[in-house]
Image (cartoon, grey):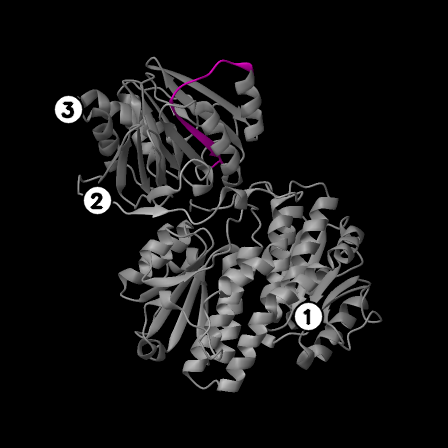
């Protein structure tokens, strides 16, 4: 969940590192630091807080170099402090390291190294690793490959996860990097090389990258790079070209990335659908699934695995696929699936969803499914990500970079793809041509419909201002609106720190109604006309307990202002797309509540964008 950047070349490394850390800050912002090598000596500077604090410190001291590493931290081991910030230095000053991940057996390694005379200054697991590298370096006899081999040998003793970038004073023109379940990529320049945990950090310098796989280790020099495995096995290097522009990751005049990404949703939805409809416009098509129609028709059950917002998208997928394709669907938290022994039918198809394609628990769930011989497919936003490479096939979202920690456009794109999957699988079974054509037309119209909802931003902002002082809120919905209630509650708690919970509206009577009072407003998602009266009954129940009610309903609905305190009307669309349309108001509501509460919207406390630790 931390950000790593490294550079070796003939330019000022410091500025490249600072710029990269600024772009990586959404991955962690507890502290930040850089290390460079000049005349076989380290220059290390670390600061608590945002990267801006580090930049201010650099402006006041003299620090230079043509090779260096940088790190922005999301704390796992040890409190947020300067001594726990990265990069860390080994006890005798030979090595410096930036690390993302968790070393699970760090206590036993620490005891071993204490017995060998090593000392420690921090509370981190990372300092144990950098000292273990120094220990093996002192024993290594091969002078040409001493640096690389010492890192290799140290990693053989490590249990856990890591993405690392290491400097050595005695090899002042090299960086050694390695990964296990934590993303790293190498950027290839002209007379220079880069390493980063995220393409956003280096996209302004190069388009050519190589994604490291688990168990691989690489040595970078200004002119070349060499990749092998921890067991010195040969590696087939696959060079890729980055598929997005640097300006895609800028705020573009918006106050926050989250607001920008909310308003990018029409375009993100267009990109998710582009080229994915049949010529007769009666169904979807997905070339990346790598499954024949015959194989797909044999699927008796689908299991979705994900974490966080992506897990909520899976819940929507369950409703849609069961309704339109008539295939039983189950949804599991990836973090639970990896440790369970669930009985799975041989004709089960497993989907994982991850915006980053690097979510550790989701990756582990995918690997567990593959280990048991199941076909695994992925929905992800990042081309070349670990999950995309590991899966048997899948679907790219093409949403573009999502920098805001609270997911917005990636979530609605995931639901859009789920709707298209429901259409695709439904047309293979018993959905008629006419119903398929109506579904496709609704999908074509979706971006413009979302634009219409976004145009109500000012109205939603005024509603949010009325409720920003509250400390509790319930989000309630039925059937496919229940997951959107969960998403609304998640967004609100993520960025405004207001306690909020999502429930099926009918379940309110079975416990949550105990929370309802004038101090706990309720946000209803009531877009389904077929069960509107059921929602109205639930609304009356909370109003009789003096709770204020906000509701999202469709234009022309019988649910009017007389039933609620604040009403947000959205266009009436195909039932499969109602979850997407209803999501826009809850995103805007959460955003404006957080803004009125003075919260740091793009960098909410304790959170980071890509969860690469367990």
Distance between mark 1 and mark 2 Cα atoms:
59 Å
Callout 3 secondary element: loop
Inspect the magenta stretch and tell me whether residue 418 lies in it.
no
Look at 77% across and 55% down and name the residue there.
458
Q: Name the residue under label 1.
A: 509
Q: Residue 486 appears at what percent x and percent y? A: 60, 61
Q: How crowded is mark 3: few (under 14 residues within 10 Å), some or many (20 or more)?
A: few
Q: Do the residues labelled 3 and 2 touch (CB within 8 Å)?
A: no
Query: Residue tagged by mark 3?
Result: 142
Residue 503 visible in the snapshot: no
State the residue position of label 2.
235
Is 367 drawn above or below residue 609 in the view shown? below
Seen in the picture, residue 231 relative to 305 is either above or below; the reply is above
Kindly identify the residue that appears in the image at 28 percent across and 64 percent down: 372
Picture quadrant where residue 265 is located = bottom right
Secondary structure beneath label 2 = loop
Image: magenta residue range: 60-76
Q: Position of residue 241 (x, y in %)?
A: 37, 47
Q: Earlier in the sequence, mark 1 or mark 3?
A: 3
The reply, left or right, for residue 444 in relation to residue 510 is left
Q: Where is residue 393 in the image (x, y as percent from the top left)?
A: 34, 63
Q: Distance between the residues labelled 1 and 3?
A: 71 Å
Callout in the foreground (1, 3): 3
Q: Pick whichever of labels 1 and 2 is earlier in the sequence.
A: 2
Observer-nearest residue: 95 or 175? 175
* Residue 387 shows up from this direction: yes
- The secondary structure type at the circle numbered 1 is helix
Tell me the quarter of the picture where residue 455 sits.
bottom right
Q: Which residue is drawn at 55% across and 24% down?
A: 55
Is label 3 or label 2 in front? 2
Q: Can you give x and y, in whole percent of width and height, for residue 157 in the image?
A: 25, 36
Q: Which of pointers 1 and 2 indicates the residue nearer the eye?
A: 2
């Amino acid at each position: 969940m931390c950000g790593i950047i490294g550079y070796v070349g003939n330019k000022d490394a410091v500025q490249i590192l600072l710029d990269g850390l600024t772009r990586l800050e959404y991955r962690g912002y507890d502290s930040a630091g850089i290390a460079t090598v000049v005349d076989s000596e380290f220059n290390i500077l670390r600061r608590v807080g945002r990267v801006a604090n580090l930049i201010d410190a650099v402006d006041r001291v003299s620090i230079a170099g043509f090779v260096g590493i940088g790190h922005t931290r999301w704390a796992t081991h040890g409190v947020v402090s300067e001594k726990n910030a990265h990069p860390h230095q080994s006890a005798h000053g030979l090595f410096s390291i930036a690390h993302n991940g968790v070393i699970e057996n760090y206590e036993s390694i620490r005891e071993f190294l204490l017995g060998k005379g090593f000392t420690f200054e921090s509370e981190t697991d990372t300092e144990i690793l950098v000292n273990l590298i120094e220990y093996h370096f002192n024993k290594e006899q091969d002078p040409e490959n001493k640096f690389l081999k010492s890192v290799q040998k140290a990693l053989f003793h490590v249990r856990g996860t890591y993405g690392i970038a290491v400097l050595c004073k005695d090899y002042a023109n090299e960086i050694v990097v390695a990964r296990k379940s934590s993303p790293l990529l190498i950027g290839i320049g002209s007379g220079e090389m880069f390493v980063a945990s995220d393409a956003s950090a280096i996209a302004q310098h190069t388009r050519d990258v190589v994604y490291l796989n688990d168990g691989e280790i690489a040595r970078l020099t200004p002119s070349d790079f060499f990749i092998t495995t921890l067991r010195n096995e040969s590696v087939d290097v696959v060079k890729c070209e980055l598929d997005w522009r640097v300006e895609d990751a800028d705020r573009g005049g918006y106050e926050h990335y989250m607001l920008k990404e909310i308003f990018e949703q029409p375009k993100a939805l267009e990109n998710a659908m582009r080229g994915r409809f049949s010529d007769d416009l009666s169904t979807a098509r997905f070339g990346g699934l790598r499954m024949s129609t015959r194989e797909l028709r044999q699927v008796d059950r689908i299991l979705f695995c994900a974490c966080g917002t992506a897990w909520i998208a899976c819940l929507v997928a369950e409703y849609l696929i069961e309704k339109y394709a008539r295939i039983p669907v189950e949804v599991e938290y990836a973090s639970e699936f990896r440790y369970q022994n669930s009985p799975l039918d041989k004709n089960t198809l497993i989907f994982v969803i991850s915006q980053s394609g690097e979510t550790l628990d989701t990756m582990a769930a995918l690997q567990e499914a593959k280990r048991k011989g199941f076909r695994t497919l992925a929905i992800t936003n990042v081309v070349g990500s670990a999950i995309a490479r590991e899966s048997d096939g899948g679907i790219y979202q093409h949403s573009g970079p999502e920098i805001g920690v609270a997911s917005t456009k990636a979530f609605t794109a995931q639901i859009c793809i789920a709707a298209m999957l429901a259409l695709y699988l439904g047309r293979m079974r018993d959905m008629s041509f006419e119903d398929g054509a109506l579904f496709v037309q609704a999908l074509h119209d979706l971006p413009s419909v979302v634009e219409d909802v976004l145009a109500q931003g000012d109205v939603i902002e005024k509603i949010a201002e009325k409720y920003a002082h509250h400390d509790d809120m319930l989000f309630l919905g039925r059937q496919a609106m229940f997951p959107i209630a969960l998403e609304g509650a998640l967004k609100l708690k993520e960025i405004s720190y207001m306690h909020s919970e999502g429930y099926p509206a009918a379940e309110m009577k079975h416990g949550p109604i105990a929370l309802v009072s004038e101090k706990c407003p309720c946000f209803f998602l009531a877009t389904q006309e077929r069960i509107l009266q059921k929602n109205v009954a639930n609304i009356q129940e909370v109003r009789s307990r003096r709770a204020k009610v906000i509701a999202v309903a469709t234009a022309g609905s019988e649910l009017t202002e007389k039933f609620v305190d604040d009403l947000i009307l959205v266009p009436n669309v195909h039932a499969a797309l109602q979850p997407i349309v209803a999501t826009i108001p809850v995103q805007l509501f959460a955003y404006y509540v957080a803004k009125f509460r003075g919260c740091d919207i793009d960098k909410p406390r304790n959170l980071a964008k890509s969860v690469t630790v367990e």
